[in-house]
Image (cartoon, rainbow, N blue to C red):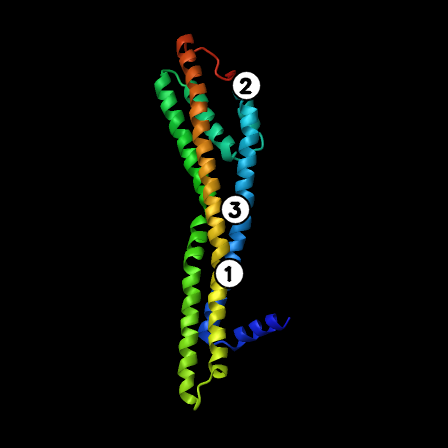
Amino acid sequence: MNSNLSILQLVLEASLVVQLVMALLVAASVTSWAIILRKRRLLGDAATGSTAFEEKFWSGGDLAGLYREVTRGGEAPRNMAGLFEAGFREFRRLSDQPGMGADQILESVRRAMHVAQLREMDRLEESLSTLATIGSTSPYVGLFGTVWGIMSSFQGLGNVQSATLAVVAPGISEALVATAIGLFAAIPAVIGYNRFADKVSRLEVRYDSFIEEFFSVLERHARARAMAGPGAPVAAVGR
């Protein structure tokens, strides 16, 4: 209790510049924790949703039926289902057009899935740069507050006849609180950034693998349709 009160007292008695630094660091800490909680839920949902979709995709059902299922809600599907939706939608659209060769269809399908992947990765990586910035700059901002506070303390010694530790200690303690708050803001941000960056990289590898596997499936169907002729049905594509 005494420790908490003394720290609060040090913050209240600090100079205006040091208080502004502390307020900035507290705001950065609140921002980083909000990002951490949001990204934890977002990446967890992305991993869980991708796993569930992969199970459906390789269950042996019909691709057209799976496409109707992922687009049934009216909202644009996300995660791995969004990659599938973009690729199959382009495949079905171009397959309905006369005179389209298999190579043209497949090239357009690959581009569509690649664009969908870029959008998905941009969504997953959102705010990670903010975490990196908070983690890398907060200690230096806190150090600035500490240096400023120590400078103010030593300048105040000019008005004191005898400079003792009891006179200097409060000002230095006030300044060191800024460094402590800076570390408090930086450490969770750095840990969160490293953890989430690793998860995003793993999801990107999974998306790359799925695109190649799905592209191989569509390539077989495109070649088979080219041999069967333009009248071959497309809606009943199976694995």
Q: Which residue is depicted at the point 43% across and 70% down? A: 145
Q: What is the secondary structure assignment of the residue under circle 1?
A: helix
- Give neighbour class at mark 2: few <14, some 14-19, many 20+ (Cα, 10 Å): some
> Is residue 171 visible in this depiction of the protein?
yes
Give yes or no for contact between labels 1 and 2 (Cβ–Cβ under 8 Å). no
Residue 236, which numbered label? none
**Quadrant in which the N terminus appears:** bottom right
Helix or strand or loop: what does disc 3 sit on? helix
Point out residue 117 in the picture as x, y percentages from the top left corner: 43, 34
- The residue located at (48%, 28%) in the rendering is 84
Tell me which residue sits at (53%, 27%) in the image.
54
CA gap, disc 3 and disc 2: 33 Å
Q: Looking at the picture, how far across and down is residue 162, in whole percent?
A: 44, 89
Element type at marker 2?
loop
The reply to whether residue 93 is in sight is no
In the picture of the structure, the residue carrying the numbered disc 1 is 184
Residue where numbered disc 3 is placed: 39
Q: Nearer the viewer, residue 205 or 81?
A: 205
In the rendered image, residue 150, in percent from the top left (x then y), is placed at 42, 75
Q: Quick check: 32 above or below 112?
A: below
**Label whose residue precedes the other's in the sequence (3 or 1):** 3
Q: CA distance from mark 3 to mark 1?
A: 19 Å
Q: Which residue is mark 2?
A: 62
Q: Nearer the viewer, residue 162 or 227?
A: 162
